[in-house]
Every structure is written in C-alpha cells, then in structure tokens.
Image (spheres, rainbow, N blue to C red):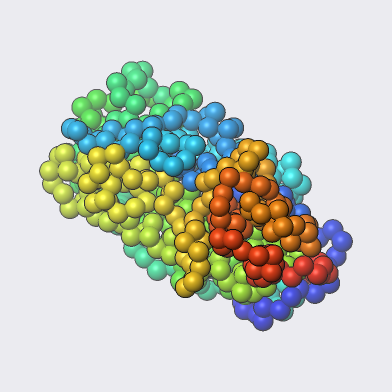
Amino acid sequence: MSKSAPRSPAGPRTATGPEVLVVGAGPTGLLLAGDLAAAGTRVTVLEKRGRKLSNLTRSFTVHARTLEQLQARGAAEDIIATGTKLPTLPLFGDLDIHFAHLRTRYPYVLITPQFHVEQVLERRAVSLGVEFRHDTEVTGLRQDAHGVELDAVTADGTRETHRAAYAVGTDGVRSTVRRLLDIPFPGDSVLRSVILADVLMKEAPADLLTVDANEHGFAFVAPFGDGYYRVLAWNRHTDSSADESVDFEELRRLCRAILGRDFGMHEPRWVSRFHSDERQATRYREGRFFLAGDAAHVHSPAGGMGMNTGLQDAMNLAWKLAAAVRGHGDDALLDTYEAETHPVGEEVLRTSGSLVRAAIRQSGRTRLAQQAMVWFAGHLGPLGEALGRREGLAVSGTGITYGRQRGDHRLVGRFFHGRLTGGRLDGALGTGRFVLLSPDEAVRTAVADWSDRVVTAPADVRTTLLIRPDGYVAWAADGPGPAAVRDALNRWAGPAEPRIRLAYAG
C-alpha cells in the first residue's frame, strides 16, 4: 500500500464525487466538513458509528477564541444557548481568574457538553450539503499523485472504496487513518483511572463550580445547564484499567471522601473511566492525507483543551484545502497547516502536562485543589503567569497566534478583533474567502481580479489588513500601494488568473 505520493495537482475529477473525505464525525470533523462545504468544496464524512449512536462526551468547555470563530459561521449563539457562562473562575481564598478583561465579545468560559456542540455543527454541515456515511469503517488507504482512496466496510459487511483529492483523519485518539499511515504517536499516560460521569443531583451544589482535593484525590463538579452535572474524580490510591467498568457507587464514595457529600447524585446518563494521555503525532501531513483533532494530539479531555484545539485545527486547515481543490493553493500553503498548528499542540501538551504533574506531586490540600482547578479550566498559558495575576490571563485560547517572518508587520499572525465601519466581520469569514480591510479606496479596488475569493470593506483602521478565512491576519502594511496589495494577494489567495478546478478522477 502506498502511503506517500508526490504532491502534484489532482487529475481530472468526476462531476459528483467528493473532493475531500473526512474520517470521523466528532467536533473537529464536523466543523472541518462544514467549512469546506461553505467554501464550495464537495465533502463526504465517513463515520463508523451509527447515525443515532451518540458520541461519548468528555469535553465540556468551549473557550472564547472558539466562540469568536464560530460566531463568524453563525454557530456560536446556538451553542451558547445550551451552556452555562462562567465570567469568573473561583479558586481558593482570594485567588480567582477573571475573564471580563479579555479582549473578546465572549469574556467567559462556556460549560456545555460536547454532544451539544456536535449537534449544532452537524446541522450546519448538513445544511451546507455535506454527505454523511454512517456505519462505515475505514480499513485501508492509498494515494498517488492524483488523489486518495479509502477502503471501508459497512455495518452489513459491504465493502466499498471512496475516492477524493484529499482526506483528513479526524477519527480520534485511536485514529485508523494515523495507524494506516504509520505516523508515530509518542507519549505516555500521566494520570490513570479518572472517572467521568454526567449525573442528576437531588441537592444543587452551593457554588457554580465545586472543586476540592485531599489525601484521597481530587474531584470537580460543574453544571451543564440542562439539569445534569459533569463530575470528574481521581482516586489517588487506585490504578484501574481504563477498560474496567465503573461502579456508580464507587464515584459516590469518592466524592463523599473528597467533597464531603455526593449531592444525592443519581441517574447517570453515562459513566466512564479514562487514562489522561499526553501524545502528539510526529507529523500532521502525509502527502494528501492530514490529521486533525485527537488524531493529531491528545491530552486531558477535562477542561476542554482537546476539543477547542481540534476545532482550531479544523478552521486552520479547511480554507487551505478548499484553496488547493480550487487550484488557488499550492503545497507550500498546505504545509503551513502543520507548521502553524503543531506548535500550538505542543504548547497545550506542555501546559496540561505540567498542571497534571503539579497536582499529582502536591500533598497540600489547597495547593492540589488550585492546580486541579486550573487544569480543568483548560488554561492555555503559563500557569505561573495566570496564578501570579489575580485577574488571570487568557485561559480561553485567545493567546493563540501564528508565527510571522522577519520583516512582517507586527499584526501578522494575530487574530483580528477590530470592527468594520458598518458592523462586525461576521458572515465574511468561514467560507474560504479572505477579507481585505483598508481605509484607502484605491487599495480596495486592487482586489477586483480576486473577487471570487476576496471581499473588501472599509474599516476604522489605519493599517491595511488581509484577513485569512480563519480570522487571523495573513498580511498587513501601513500605507501600501495597490502593487503591494496585489503581491500579498498572489502569495496568500493565489494568482488572479482562473484555474481549472481539479480533483480526483474516480
């Protein structure tokens, strides 16, 4: 089986076949498929779960940066409606983490179960024409200079082959795509036998968030907003297998030992045991195949870092794949996916790992609880910096930036937070199109030849900005002429001359 291939443009395509195959219908795969379809790309999602089989919810936090980007896709409000907003994250004593100071329209952490996020993203993907093939398990893959093929088997044993120009594995920590590509996934389990459950409670906790730790371990309780509560608990003296079933009474006993009460928890809608792993794929790209989400990196699902980082992967990759399918993007552009997102994954692993190890090492009650709380909150920056400033820093992903080259404007690689003269940027992004903002009408006129992939707008800015479809600044300059703008457009949006749309021929 060929696992790598020259990265030349795809050959002639069939009229109706998919141009991109997405393996896995979790949050990352759903957002990726929706973004691709919004950009005019034909997408098929292959999912081994049945259509009515719900995904187990481990993640429960949606951060500000994710909400900012989902707002541009019209999906944020539906997700917010299902959750609980936490403008301040209380720790212990006088130590709190505040979000009100963040430069975002979402100055809070949103607590909502992963399956609610999936429902919203799936509705969006379906409305945009994404094809879903449930009960379809990938068993083999191939690629050549013109495209990819995925072998699959359906629930009734039917064997089939799916063809496209590119494929993305978003199929989780046990990714079949990653395994078939022989991409190493090094790492270790840093915390074993953590129990997760969603339960009803006879007594509502007095605090919005409940956390504590002692010689028995640590426990955390947070509301979902639908009557259920997420409970996470770790027994310091247990090292059970992740596959070992969880006795619900075991969870209740552990909460009583750590929190002093179990709040009358009952009727769990699901209970699971997991090992908290730190792993990252050595590469995110193999020719025409890509990895994203938990297939590319995994860390503690508590606190939502995994889901949010995976959604960042999807938004980074989608517009680049769409450009490649259209013939506007080349291999250099596709290579920037790994170059930009792999360091973000590394930072998340370092942060979550240091927080987990700090919690394990500490024996003092308050110190351990503080470490555990920040871990669950999904902090993405240095722990010492957040704890040192009582108001905290961005624990929400708003600190994510992509690198810039020597000589680039200082705004390059940063997320755009400005406003248009007539309103926000919503609606212009998330469809594979760039946005050029400039106070100079002559500069905006220079975009005419790229009108199929770049939109322009006047803005209350002094600097001319070319904003990528994922909301980050691709290029910026103070007082540029039309020629400089055209050079930037050629670099990022591809040549103005129309190209033949190319993909895989079935």
Q: Is residue 123 above or below residue 83?
A: below
Please tell me which residue lies in front, 331 or 416. 416
Q: Is residue 345 above or below residue 263?
A: below
Farthest residue, direction top: 202
Farthest residue, direction bottom: 6
- Give the image location of residue 370, x and y in percent: 23, 41
Determine whether, in the image, residue 184 is placed left or right of residue 164: left
Q: How many marks?
A: 0
Residue 245 quadrant: top left
Instruction: State the residue at coordinates (44%, 42%).
Output: 103
Farthest residue, direction left: 364
Residue 260 quadrant: top left
Determine whether, in the image, residue 39 is placed left or right of residue 501: left
Point out the image quarter for the C terminus.
bottom right
Please tell me which residue lies in front, 421 or 275. 421
Instruction: State the residue at coordinates (33%, 36%).
Output: 98
Q: Is residue 52 above or below residue 349?
A: above
Point out the image quarter for the N terminus.
bottom right
- Give the image location of residue 124, x and y in percent: 68, 41
Please tell me which residue lies in front, 212 or 465. 465
- Can I make out residue 389 in this image? yes
- Give the image location of residue 501, x and y in percent: 81, 66
- Can I make out residue 271 in this image? no
Instruction: State the residue at coordinates (41%, 24%).
Output: 200
